[in-house]
Every structure is written in structure tokens, then in C-alpha cells.
Image (spheres, rainbow, N blue to C red):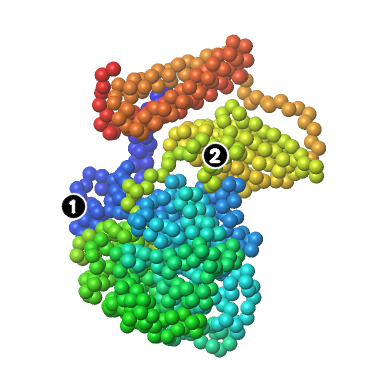
Amino acid sequence: MKLSLKPLAASLLAVVIGAGSSPAFSQDSLQDVMAKRGLTEKDILAAAKTYTPTGGRDEYLAFSSGGQSGQVIVYGIPSMRILKYIAVFTPEPWQGYGFDDESKAVLAQGRIDGKDITYGDTHHPAITETEGEYDGKYLFINDKANPRVAVIDLHDFETKQIVVNPFFRSDHGGAFVTPNSEYVMEASQYPAPYKGMHDFVPLSEFNDKYRGGLTYWKFNREIGRLVMGESFNFEMPPYSQDLNDAGKGPSYGWGFTNSFCSERYVGGIEKGRPPFEAGCSSKDTDFMHVTNWKKAEELVAAGKFEKVNGMYLITMEQAVANDLMYLIPEPKSPHGVDVSPDGAHIIVSGKLDSHAWVYSWEKIQKAIADKNFESTDPYGIPIISLEAALARSVSVGLGPLHTQYDSKECVVYTSIYVDSMITKWDYCEGKVLDQLPIHYNVGHLMTMEGDSVSPDGKYLVALNKLSIDRFNPVGPLHPQNHQLIDISGDKMELLYDMPLPLGEPHYVVAIAADKLSPVVRYKSGWNSREDKRSEFKTRAGREKTERSCDGAGQCTVEVFGTTIRSHITPEIIQVEEGDKVIIHLTNLERAQDEVHGFAMYGQNVQLSIEPGKTASTTFIADKAGVFPYYCTEFCSALHLEMEGILLVTPKGYEATDDALVEGTTYTQADYDKQVDTNVQTQAVIDSVVKFITSRNFKDFPIVVALVEDATDQLGFAEEAKKKAADFATAGDWNKAMGWANQWWQYQVKTADLGLRAKTHLEENGAVEVAQ
Ligand code: RUQ
Ligand code: CUA
């Protein structure tokens, strides 16, 4: 009986290598490998800056929008290794999201007019801030297509809430947070009649009845949720509001929203009119909207505004009367609006122009105080003249979009879409410092903690819209290309290309990894989607199945079950055709990473049950039949045996024989042989235990956790051993043999854990301690 897996692995490797071509580089020197692969010294240097050895951790975690995949992608920087997809607006089977009853309830919050919307066009993630610093508690992200904002809790990286904007029919400018995450900003994009106020309005009334807007969603940190009833919305002209950013420092309390299509063009290509793209880019300037959320908040508290659709509505008239909103011209079809870390400047790009425009908050404030307005727009909103607000404009390249700030004062990076490059420039002096080509057509770009009051600099990620020839071809739909750039020196250095084959990521935020401390398991019996103890939590030994029928004759079978390596309790569920079946499963594991899945044939059931979690599924067993179910995670050597059967009997079915047949009959000799194996296995376990306890294993938290888990498993082995002995005494060799095997299963799990602990100690330099 050999339990060490090493010789097995070695022989397998020998087979694999022997069967194929010989390894290309195994004994080569670095120079040889460089020559064979055609790598330059610069490549090696870039590799050394990004390569993260096995087991190594990244310095930053990046949260990227997944675009029209409706998800968030998490990856490490500088390794650019993808660590997770967080399901947000789209069902994600691997996580049980949109499959368990608990997460279905989260997705249901995002219904629009009663319709399930099972995708999203995620655009801009934002991390919660405290005094302008990322605090790593929550992440927000918007859905542009269906104006929604989601709240992701970073204690377990799960989506907890989806809110639907009660007025808009699209949003682009979400999600941006104010410096203490008091509010999450969400601006509409495509003007439309406000929901609940007007349903259909013909385009002939576009100027009067179509509207844009900016919602300030109140975030309640205590409960970690957005609160509609404490939120307010600024009604805005039917321009296409674009992105937002919140003021900070001297501009704290204010918000900035740029816009395009202030032409208020309504299209009509099929009527022989010029298309939207021409009609929306005819004027020389559009508008930045400047809103005073701090004052609006006070007026809301003073009962100044009415609630419409469950949220406070500030009409344009009220905003003007109360000095809450101003406009400032921006160059032709602008894009992006980025407030400097010190809150003193705001940079907007000219998209159809080669300039970036630096606005001065001091000058804007003065214009507001002096009521120095050049005119009002058609809706009566005061317009501050460009000259009164602008500090300078700088030619940065063709098609500038977004700007990110460095840790170095006055240094910024702007993405240049048409020229496919990043321009590094100084916004105080107004001069270009460096330019770097990217591949290709960059949209957003992002520096480490770049949206906070103290950006870290170091790395920049370019989120490129096209990858064209950068990767092995995989058909007409290409991956996106995120390029990692070293910005620590005077010159930018391109380090790495990462293909992202999941939607079109729009924006990404990166936070120092040490600010995050996600849990590794849930408190036992946890409803993770609501973040509270599940009312269906089930303890070991308390599993039960109940059946009840209502007056109308609808019967419900409710299962309170558990999962633990390597069995699902119950293993047999019997219901009648037409029954409603509700299955609650609690994962009893306390061990890290011991997730169990639960998939069932033909019922669209797939749960992911992380340690401690309780997840539920509900379906109608509408067809008689036999429905196998099993665990979908390879959780132990006996994972394949982690199975069960749902029997759906035909209506009125009478059992003639309920006995479970034995496939094999065992004798005392079989039993004795198994017991012998178990005794030998125990000797192996004992030797591993001796190794571990003779080392300073308590200095290794991972080993301590493994030992705890192993001790549990060994306890289960003892219980099974006792049952085996009892049946042996009674002469029931089949049951005795079964329990002797179960005893051995627990021993195997114990040994698996023990060997992992032993390997960890050996690899990490544990030392012998006095016994
Ligand atoms: S916007 S590529 Cu959708 Cu963030 Cu500028
Ligand atoms: Cu649990 Cu496989």
C-alpha cells in the first residue's frame, strides 16, 4: 500500500515525455533559450518585470469591466493572470449565479418592466473610497444597455445588488464614486422620455420631452447597498451625457459630466437625412455639466424636491433656481472627464480634435461666484465661457479619449485612439513628455489607483479595442488586448500583451492587493447573496426530506441536504410526477477551496456550494423518470462517486418492491481483507503525522488548517470504523464491508491532506523541534 503520489507523477511524466518530442530547452542556458526563441535582452527584461513564479502573488488586483459579457474580470498586475470572472448581470453557471434561487433573486432585481434581462454592457467599475483613497470594500459597475448599477461585495467577490434607474433608458456615465462613496454617479446617454412620466413621445417633441440626466445613487455603507429612496436625479437637457467624475479636495461636493451631441440631432438616415454620426458632430463645442451634489443633498434633506418613481427628481428649472447646475463649453464631441488627484483641474479630451483641455477649478469657481456667464442654453442653464474656465489646451495626438494621473505631480497619460498610442504629458506646463505606440486603437487606460487622491503610478494598462495581428488567429471574433506598460521611468516601456476573450472591456481599476482581504469560507449555512445565515442551513445528521400538499393538490418536496467529501446527503430523492422540488444544500466543509457543485440531468440545475454556503434550487418535476445528480468539482479521489438519484414516479405509482438491490455480496474474508488494508493505511497516516508533529508546523498557517481538516476526516474514519465493527459483530458482511470501505475513504482523505501538509513543510524549510 503506497500513498506517496510522487513516484506515480514521475512515471506519468516519463510516459508523456517519452511519447512525444524531446523537451526543447530542458538543459539549455538562458542564452540558448533566448537564441532558440528569438528573444532580445529587452524581452527578457520585460519578462522579469512581469513573470510571477509559481505560488507568487501580484502587487495589484485589477477589476475590469467585461463589456457585453455582463461580467467583471479580475486579474493580477504585473503578472496579468486572470484570477476570476465575477458574475454580475449575466448568469454564470460555474458560480451557480442565475441558477441557485438566492442569486436568481439578485438578477430579478434587474428586471425591466417585468422582463428578465440576462446580459449587461458593463462599462466603468469603481472601488469604494474613503477620503478619496480606495478602501477595497465594494465595487460598483454600470450596465450601459439597460441603465443599471450593481454592487459587488469584495469580502467574497459576489454581486449583492442590482438597481435599475427609474428614469433612464440607457446609461454610459456610471459608475463613478464621490470621495467617501457617499454617492455613485450614473449619467444617461441616449436621450429618451423619462420612464414613468412619458412612455411614448414622438421624435417631433424631442426638444421638449426627451431628456438626459445624472443620478446620484446614495450608498449606505453600513448595509452595503444603494438606497433608491435617498437618491436624487438631475434632469438634464437631451444632450448625450457621457462620463462623470467627482470633484475632490477644493472641488469636493461637485460633479462633472461631459456630453456630446448637444446638436440634439435625431437621426433619420432612411429619410435621406445625414446619419447620427454627422448630425451629432456638427457644432464646434458641446458641454460639460457641473453639478453641486453637496448642496442638492442639503436641499433634498430640507424637503425641497418631490419624489418621482421612488427617487428625488431635481428638474432643470429647480437646478437653475437653486444654483445647482452649470454648463461649460467643451471641444467638439468630447470624451472622458478626469479630475486631478488634488481636485484642482479637470481634463477633457477632444475626441475629434487633437487637443486635451485642462480646466481650472479655481477659475470655474470664480466664474460661478461672479455670475460670469456668457449665456444660457435653450433650457435656461447658465453657460460659463470656455475662456473663463480653461487653464490651457495641449496638442496630444489624434483622437484623444481618456486621461489618467501619475504619482508624479503634473504628469498624466492620455489614450490616443486614432493614432494608437499613449501620450505622456505635463498638464501644468502643457508639454508632451513621451509617446508610445500600442496595438491597437486604445480606449481607456489606467494607472495603479489612478482615480484616487494618491495614484501609485508604476504601471499603466492600455485597454485596446482591436488586437488584429497580436495573437494566434482564432476566427473573426478576436480577443481584446490589454497591454501592460512600465511607467516608473521617464520613458514608457511596453511589457506585456494580455488577450481578454470576454466581451469588450471598457474600463478597469486597480487596487493594491494588500488592501483586500476576502474570506476563504463562509460562516456555516450562509446565504451569500443576501449575506446572512440561510434559513435552510442544515447540520450534519439533520438532513431531511419533507413532502406536503396544498388545497389545490400541488405537492412540494423540500430537501434539506448537505455535501461533504465525498457524498451528497440525501443520495436518493423520490418524488411524484408534478411535484415541486426544492433542494437546499449546505456545504459542511471548513477546508479552504473544498467547493462542491450540484448538477442534475435535464432540470437546468447547477449549483456552486463553497465551504459554508447554503444554496437552493427549485423546479417542477414535470416528467416521470430517473434523474442522476452529482458533484461538479473534483473534490477528492472519490469525487466521481459523489452522486445521487432523483426518482420521479409516475402519478399514482404503487411500489411493488422497495428494496435496494445489492450488486455484489461480500463475505467475512472480504471484510477482513479490507480491515487489513485500513490498518496498513493507518500506519502510513501515523508516519505522516509523526513527520508533521516533529516539525514546527504551527508556524505555517496553511499546514495548521490542513491538520485541522485532516483531524476532522480522521474523526469521521473512527465513526465509520465503529459502524463496520458493529455490523461485523451482527454478521451482516455487506454492511460491514461497506462501512469498512467508508472508513478507508476517510483515511484516504486524511492521508491526502497529511501529504499536502508534509510537502508544504518540506518545500518551505520547516525545522525539527524537540518532542
Ligand atoms: S467610455 S473608450 Cu464607454 Cu468609458 Cu471611453
Ligand atoms: Cu464534491 Cu466532487
Q: Quadrant of the N terminus?
A: top left
Which residue is under mark 2? Answer: 533
When asked about the image quadrant of residue 77, the answer is bottom left
Q: Residues within 10 Å of mark 2 (few under 14, many from 20)?
A: some
Q: Identify residue for label 1.
A: 31
Q: Amino acid at mark 1?
A: Gln
Q: Amino acid at mark 2?
A: Arg
Q: CA distance from mark 2 to mark 1?
A: 58 Å
- Residue 411, percent from left and from top: 25, 67
Residue 771 rendering spot, x and y as whole percentages = 28, 17
Q: Where in the figure is residue 541, as x and y percent of width and height?
A: 59, 27
Dot 2 falls on a residue whose secondary structure is strand
Name which quarter of the figure residue 434 lies in. bottom left
**In the depicted structure, whether residue 673 falls above or below residue 498:** above
Name the residue: 28% across, 51% down. Answer: 51
Q: Residue extending furthest front?
A: 302
Residue 577 in the image: x percent, y percent?
75, 42
Q: Is residue 229 visible?
A: yes
> Does the residue tagged 2 have its C-beta within 8 Å of any atom of ligand 2?
no
Given this view, does label 2 or label 1 mark the residue nearer the observer?
A: 2
Residue 294 shown left or right of residue 646 in the figure: left
81 vs 77, nearest the viewer? 77
Q: Is residue 116 left or right of residue 677?
A: right
Decide if residue 421 is in sight here: no
